[in-house]
Each structure stands twice: as structure tokens, then as C-alpha cells.
């Protein structure tokens, strides 16, 4: 029997396992059983006309399993909204899932791990990530901005248009939106001074890691441009400070005196490149 076996040389891989998005694998080269079977089929049946179809079904089954478990965890979080451990854990999984998605984009696009001007990326569960359009999307961004004024709509539109012009050169968009059922439900823009801002996710779509995805992908675009990565957070906004801290951002001047009442100041937060 051994003599009839076909010898196969298995090679190591740097590909991230999709299963890693729901359970952290011990090593980067670890694969799930379904992924291992798919890889084995490619090695044993390279000339079989049904091989690619079978591999596709195995990968689709695994993606279905991953999405189902993520959905169940979101339902558990919605039933227990005060569970900090659950929300943090789910956010970490969403970020690992995004990293895997962006790895797929890297292999099929010239804009690795970022969103190009014409890219629309499926990030799972009905959500899509895309660049903002100044004419079409500025009204949404202005409507959710607490500092909206009679002049802010045009300002936001100019900021988005300026980023899109840069995107035609660099290939990377910093002004991004998340849409669900063809409607924007979240956004982030880059101000003319270079800072990230107007980060927002609609109430019905929060606690799903969308804010972290917007910040992470916009940050990667800025890094691709080799430009400084920073944002401003108002004193006392503990939710935003905790959020940026979880993503590896730090205060530019942690010892600075905090303002109170009407004297609250915007504090500069930065993301060191060596933490990426």
C-alpha cells in the first residue's frame, strides 16, 4: 500500500488562515482542517478539472462557518451590551478578519491593505467599504458632524474632493465610508491639516468593529503616503480616548493640563509607525 502512495512535498505558507478571525491561531502558518484539505487537493489533483470547484466549496464552507460564529457573537453582545470583554474580543476578531480580507486584496490589487478610489470591498455581513464621493456623500458626513454649520458642507466636500485627487496619484483613499443596503452608515475623513476626523458609525450599526475598520484602513493609506498619522480628541471624551488607545494610538502630550467646562481642549493623538 505504501508503494502505491503518491509522494507529495508539503511546503510552508505565510497565508493567514481565515479561521484565525474567530480563534487566534498559535502560529501564522497554522491552517484549519478545511483549508488543509483544500491545499491537499491542489497538490494531489492538480490536473483534475473539478479540483478548483471542490477547493472553492471547501473555502466557501469555512467562510460560512466563520460568518455564522461572528453573527452569533454579535447577537450575544447585543443581549449583553455592558460586557466589555465581549465587545473587546469581538472587535479584535473583526480586526483580524479585516486583515485577512485586506491580504486577499493585496494579492489581487495594486493597492495593498487599503481602499483605492474605485475599490468597493466586501467586509462581511452585508457591509461594504469604499472611498467617499464629495458630491454624493458630503451631506451625510455633514449631517452627523456635531460641529456642522452653514459653511461646513462645502468645507467637507472640498476635503473629500482633495483626498480623491490625491488618490488618483497615490492609489490610496483616506476619506472612507461604510455602506449597508446601499446606504452610508459610517464614515471617516482626513482634514486639510492632515488629521483624521469625523469618525462616525450610525447607532444601529455600532459594536460591530466598523469604527476600528475605518480608522485602520484610513491609517494604512496615510502610512502608504509616508505622512504623519494623527487625530484630535476633545478632553473628557473617554469613549473616543479608550477607542484610540485600544488601536495603539497614544497622546502626543500625555502630561498636558486638561481643560474643563467650556475650556476643554482638543488633544493630539498619534499612531507611531513602529506599532503598525
Image (spheres, rainbow, N blue to C red):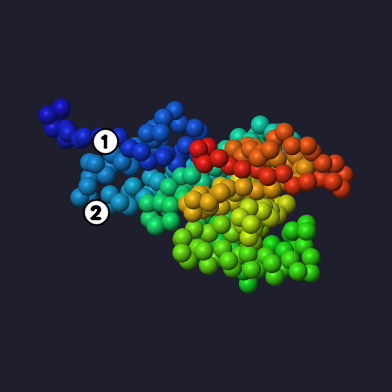
Q: Measuring from the top left, give residue 117's x and y in whole percent.
A: 50, 64
Q: Which residue is mark 2?
A: 49
Quarter in which the N terminus is drawn: top left
Residue at the outermost left position: 3
Q: Measuring from the top left, give residue 190's x and y in whole percent.
A: 62, 57
Q: Is residue 153 left or right of residue 2?
A: right
Identity of the residue drawn at 38% across and 49% down: 57
User: How far apart in space, not on screen, are marks 1 and 2 (Cα)?
Assistant: 23 Å
Q: Measuring from the top left, give residue 126's x and y in whole percent.
A: 57, 55
Q: To which quarter of the image does residue 139 belong?
A: bottom right
Identity of the residue drawn at 84% across and 46% down: 263
Q: Is residue 236 left or right of residue 63?
A: right
Instruction: Give the camera-side residue of 209 and 65.
Output: 209
**Mark with earlier residue (1, 2):** 1
> How many other residues sit within 10 Å of disc 1, few (<14), some (14-19) or many (≥20)?
few
Q: Is residue 171 left or right of residue 206?
A: left
Residue at the outermost bottom position: 135
Q: To which quarter of the image does residue 238 belong?
A: top right
Q: To which quarter of the image does residue 17 belong?
A: top left
Identity of the residue drawn at 30% across and 34% down: 12
Q: Is residue 199 above or below residue 14?
A: below
Residue at the outermost right position: 261
Q: Which residue is mark 1?
A: 11
Amino acid at each position: 500500500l505504501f508503494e502505491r502512495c503518491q509522494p507529495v512535498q508539503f511546503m510552508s505558507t505565510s497565508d493567514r488562515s481565515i479561521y484565525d478571525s474567530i480563534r487566534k491561531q498559535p502560529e501564522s502558518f497554522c491552517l484549519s482542517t478545511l483549508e488543509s484539505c483544500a491545499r491537499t487537493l491542489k497538490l494531489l489533483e492538480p490536473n483534475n478539472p473539478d479540483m478548483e470547484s471542490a477547493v472553492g466549496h471547501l473555502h466557501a464552507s469555512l467562510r460560512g462557518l466563520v460568518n455564522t460564529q461572528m453573527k452569533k457573537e454579535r447577537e450575544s453582545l447585543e443581549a449583553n451590551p455592558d460586557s466589555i470583554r465581549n465587545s473587546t474580543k469581538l472587535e479584535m476578531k473583526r480586526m483580524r478578519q479585516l486583515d485577512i480580507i485586506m491580504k486577499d486584496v493585496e494579492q489581487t490589487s495594486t493597492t495593498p491593505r487599503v481602499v483605492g478610489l474605485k475599490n468597493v470591498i466586501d467586509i462581511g455581513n452585508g457591509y461594504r467599504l469604499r472611498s467617499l464621493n464629495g458630491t454624493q456623500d458630503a451631506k451625510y458626513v455633514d449631517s452627523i458632524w456635531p460641529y456642522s454649520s452653514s459653511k461646513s458642507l462645502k468645507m467637507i466636500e472640498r476635503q473629500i474632493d482633495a483626498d480623491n485627487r490625491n488618490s488618483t496619484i497615490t492609489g490610496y483613499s483616506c476619506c472612507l465610508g461604510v455602506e449597508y443596503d446601499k446606504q452610508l452608515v459610517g464614515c471617516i475623513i482626513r482634514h486639510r491639516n492632515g488629521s483624521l476626523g469625523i469618525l462616525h458609525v450610525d447607532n444601529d450599526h455600532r459594536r460591530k468593529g466598523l469604527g476600528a475598520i475605518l480608522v485602520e484602513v484610513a491609517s494604512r493609506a496615510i502610512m502608504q503616503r509616508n505622512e504623519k498619522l494623527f487625530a484630535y480628541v476633545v478632553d473628557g471624551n473617554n469613549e473616543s480616548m479608550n477607542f484610540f488607545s485600544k488601536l495603539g494610538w497614544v497622546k502626543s502630550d500625555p502630561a498636558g493640563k486638561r481643560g474643563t467646562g467650556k475650556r476643554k481642549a482638543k488633544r493630539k493623538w498619534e499612531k507611531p509607525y513602529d506599532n503598525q
